[in-house]
Image (cartoon, helix red, strand yellow):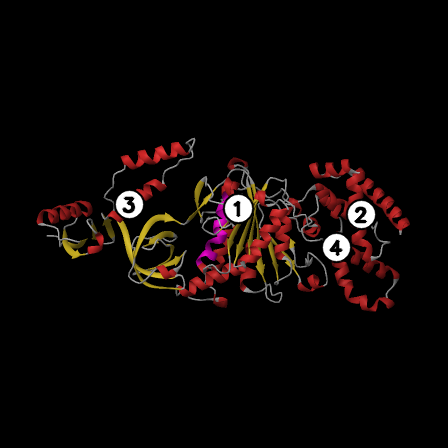
Amino acid sequence: MEESKKAFIYSATEPDDRQRARFEAFLTDKYNSPYELVWEKDESVGSGFRLKAGGDVYDWTEEGRFRQLADMLDTLDGKDFGGAGDVISLFKTSINEWQAHVVPEEEGTVLTVGDGIVVAEGLEDAVYGEIVIFESGVKGMVQDLRPDSVGIILFGDDTDVTEGCHIRRTKKTAGIPVGEAYLGRVVNALGEPIDAQGRIKADEFRAIESPAPDIVSRQPVDTPMNTGLITIDSMFPIGRGQRELIIGDRQTGKTTIAMDTILNQKGNGVICIYVAIGQKSSSVAHLVENLRKKGAMDYTIVVSASASETAPVQYIAPYAGASLGEYFMNKGKDVLIIYDDLSKHAIAYRALSLLLERSPGREAYPGDVFYLHSRLLERSARLSDAMGGGSMTALPIVETQAGDVSAYIPTNIISITDGQIFLESDLFFAGQRPAVNVGLSVSRVGGAAQTKAMKKAVGSLRLDLAQYREMEVFTQFSSDLDETTKKQLHYGQGLMKLLIQQQGHPLALHEQVIILVSAIARVMEGLEVSEVITFRDALVAHFNEQQSELCDRIDETGIMEPEDKELIIAEAKKFLAGYMNKK
């Protein structure tokens, strides 16, 4: 005869023989195995009981039945109802018709807790990434599966979680509410608003981790995602669906490039998502205020996991941002998402991994830190027309130490992305803004994501700048140089000045084309280097006023005909003559 297993009944009073027989019959029928019932007195359950068989718990206490009712109400969808009265009617009907069900809940027990990490026993069937709920209501996510225990990261204060308290499985993976109402809002990594503007009505719920689109679901990147920065749009163009890394030391203007790119999307129908990881709350608030002043928050969502947040919250923040982006991408819209920055994200994951006792590798990061970022960035794509044709363009930011791009995290992300924009400290301190190093920066999509007008306008710009940087070392001996070399140096210095842009003032396509055509034609060669920026701004203003038809045509079509180029050069020379006469 099969040996009976033990099941435990927790109640205030001991069950009688008839009740015992009913419990044992229920368990035998449920699990196809005989069970021996063991009673343990527990005054806390009140008039109900808790039945535990293996890892399953049947909670028939008042608290357990109320929890079932709350779960049922959570699943109600009132969006099809016209007003508050309809929703109230729906709730009343649902409560009147509701009946509690005998359903098993798998429970575990906390063994140790500290630093936002919980090790628990039980939860034998828990899966990686599953959300669990503690007695205090704090939520956590299963992050480590071991033969006799599970490691859980907490999304709340660990002071409310103590050794011995119970944990309940939800059988749901971590997710975030998403929807159109999130536009213009600032939320945390769990999708909860933190901008004091009230709750947000979600359209649906998306898992924070989802598979990247497969090859068949993608199409080539060939539509520009203009940044409004002449240095980038001319030499390192970014396409919709591309992943372009912004990399450089601290305080070299990485976030500024991202913000200017967001500002440049105004009126382009692009949804922007900015994910702040490990930054000061005051810095994020200042950034949001700047976006709001310039009208950019209307099409922007800010996801903030500040430095004061726990490592688990910082860890899930970029995945939550990607889920928000995928919601819009799957609706056929174009999305720009900025991860600022993934260096701090990797540090948060390293802290989690070490606390979960995973083996450290290079620079103490765990071995799967590459997968951490690859599965995030691979979610950016340009979907095929059959999938709606939406796109998600990623601009991850990575901070280097003393310009060391060969460190572990920078090399990992460089290998994942489709190019990088490298910002150099020496250029930044010399006043070159943005401080883009032309030699180390690259876009692997290149001209495929550039308009025809920009391709024609850029000409030999990159080659001219490379030649200037090589010759620059000789400027200290300028008295000994021949006239041709001096002219080349002067021309290169003028080009560098032309590429300087004021923060928060991205340039339209036609403005960049006019500046580049005029520069490559050496229209400004007779100007002093100190006058170049003043002349450039005046020239652009002149074209906007006097040649508005040409400007509008370039912006709308992205094409510059040969006669348009000749017109720009002739008009620029004419304007230069008038400018010189006024001096």
Residue, disc 3: 66
51 displayed left or right of 168: left
Q: Residue at x 60, y 39 (%)?
A: 269
x then y, percent, for residue 63: 27, 49
Residue, disc 4: 463
Mark 1 to mark 4 CA distance (whole Å): 43 Å
Q: Which is more N-terminal, label 4 or label 1?
A: 1
Q: Which is more N-terminal, label 2 or label 4?
A: 4
Mark 3 to mark 2 CA distance (whole Å): 70 Å
Q: Are marks 3 and 4 in contact (CB under 8 Å)?
A: no
Mark 3 vs mark 2: give the one in front. Answer: 3
482 displayed left or right of 124: right
Would you call the spot at circle 2 few (<14 residues within 10 Å), some (14-19), or many (20 or more)?
some
Q: Which mark is residue 185?
A: 1
Q: Are marks 1 and 2 in contact (CB under 8 Å)?
A: no
Residue, disc 2: 538
Q: Secondary structure at mark 1?
A: loop
The image shows residue 71, relative to residue 255, as above or below, that is: above
Residue type at the position of mark 4: Leu
Mark 4 to mark 2 CA distance (whole Å): 27 Å
Q: Residue at x 46, y 47 (%)?
A: 211
Is 260 part of what is drawn in magenta?
no
Residue type at the position of mark 1: Arg
Is 323 part of what is drawn in magenta?
yes
Q: Pick whichever, 482 or 135, lies toward us.
A: 135
